[in-house]
Amino acid sequence: MKHLFTLILVTISIQAWSIKASVDFIRYSNVDQQYLEVNYRIFANSLYVADVISANEVLSTIVIYKEDEVVNFQKNMLVSGLEEFTKDLLDVRRFILSPGDYKVVVELEDQKGPKHIFKIEKQVTISHKNLMLMSDIMLVSAIEQSDQESPIARNGVYMEILPYSYFGKDIDVLTSYVEVYGLQDSEKYYCSYEIIEGFEVDAGEVEVIKFKRLDSREIKAYLLKLEITDIVSGNYHFAVKLYNDKKEIIDSKIVNFVRVNPKADINQLSKRSDKIGNSFVKDIDVDSLDYFLKALAPIVHEPRRSLLDVLLENDNTIAKRRFIHDYWKETSGVGAEGAMAAYMKIARAVDHNFFNGTSYGFDTDMGYVFLRYGKPDDAMVVDNELSAFPYQIWRYNKVLSTGENNVKFLFYAPSLSHRDYRLLHSTCRLENQNRSWEAELYKKNPEEIVGNPSEVRTTNDGFTRRARDLWNDF
């Protein structure tokens, strides 16, 4: 890979059970006015699931402010069919706006189970119509011809926006939609569209570029496509530039995106010309490469994690050795060899201490948490509650990677084996958070469980049901 990068997702309100959604704000124009399109996808797997199948319901509220005054407001309910409760909810809302600066606030609230809300705010500027020759760019994830009335369709084409501007390993073509406005019949126009390394502020080399002649019409829609099979994982931006017949740029738009492409990354690792034959990874036995890679899994983030998973599925020893080398050089610099040795000493100890008979110790939930977040500041083992499976509570005063304080993890052993503890609940925002963890922990006594399937389920208080008090006080 060319460089480390961070996957940029939309900013959401930090809330323990927040639903997950991808929201995009795109500006368009018609003959007389400009309008803003709020395009969003709510992920079905983040919505509350009851024990019985029921339709998903999400209340959408969009408020638009101009200088602290509400200038537009929409509230609507998104409902899935009973047979479609596993499908994501998609919607598009359009607002005609006069020139000026606006703040757009979107709130999405799950109507099933306990209240939890997704919230995002966006600053949007609407320019004068004669200054807008091109719309913003929509990155498209699915497209088909359609004659059905739908807010997702434009100009007879059904298009789903690409969530989070994220091109995963299964996508080989970048597809975009853009509109061009008010070109004069007396002149000739064309556009370039290209993929450039880095986000807009970190512009690097051009990876792919194409050109297209444009028609002179009041409004003209274009689908622009580029092959991305050979684009390695990283941050990029897609740029569309509009030229007149004098080759002058008269308008341009860009959109940032993230590419994850393990196959291209492996090819790059295999073909690189730099030598690592005498480096600190030279003494790793071929048979130990997978062990080193699996030990890294808890601390490796995207896109490296996807690449690591693919590496473990093939026999490319050169790429595996380069992956290990590059990770420690990029994270520890001149101290890479010592950092790797120190980490592997801990990883081997974790493997020994948390080995469950079938998996490496660092593949277990407890081993994963230990390597990812370090040794807990305190731990409690409870294996004498007759009503509960054996469980442990780990507490961290501070988790540096997330900036959170007083973070807790609850592990339990549903198989009753003390070598098979699984993560049941955590307050860490990057890990599993189970609102009904008490009901799961004490499900050997279902008559003590409080709440119906559409609620957060707890248990009655009792001498043999202490987990809630221990969790709160620990």
Image (spheres, grey):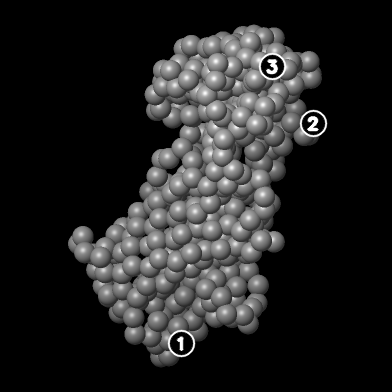
Q: 394 or 121: which is nearer to us? A: 394
The residue carrying mark 1 is 217
Q: Is residue 165 visible?
A: no
Q: Earlier in the sequence, mark 3 or mark 2?
A: 2
Could you say which quadrant of the image residue 362 lies in?
top right
The quarter in which the N terminus is drawn is: top right
Q: CA distance from mark 1 to mark 2?
A: 55 Å
Q: Residues within 10 Å of mark 1 (few under 14, many from 20)?
A: few
Q: Residue at x 53, y 51 (%)?
A: 112
Residue 238 horizontal side relative to residue 403, left or right: right
Type of amino acid under label 1: Arg
Which residue does the image show at 60% across and 73% down from the upper left? 158
Q: Tell me the crowding category of disc 2: few under 14, some 14 to 19, or many 20 or more residues within 10 angstroms, Cα based.
A: few
Q: Which residue is mark 2?
A: 315
Nearer to us of marks 3 and 2 is 3
The percent position of residue 104, horizontal first and vertical second, equals 33, 60
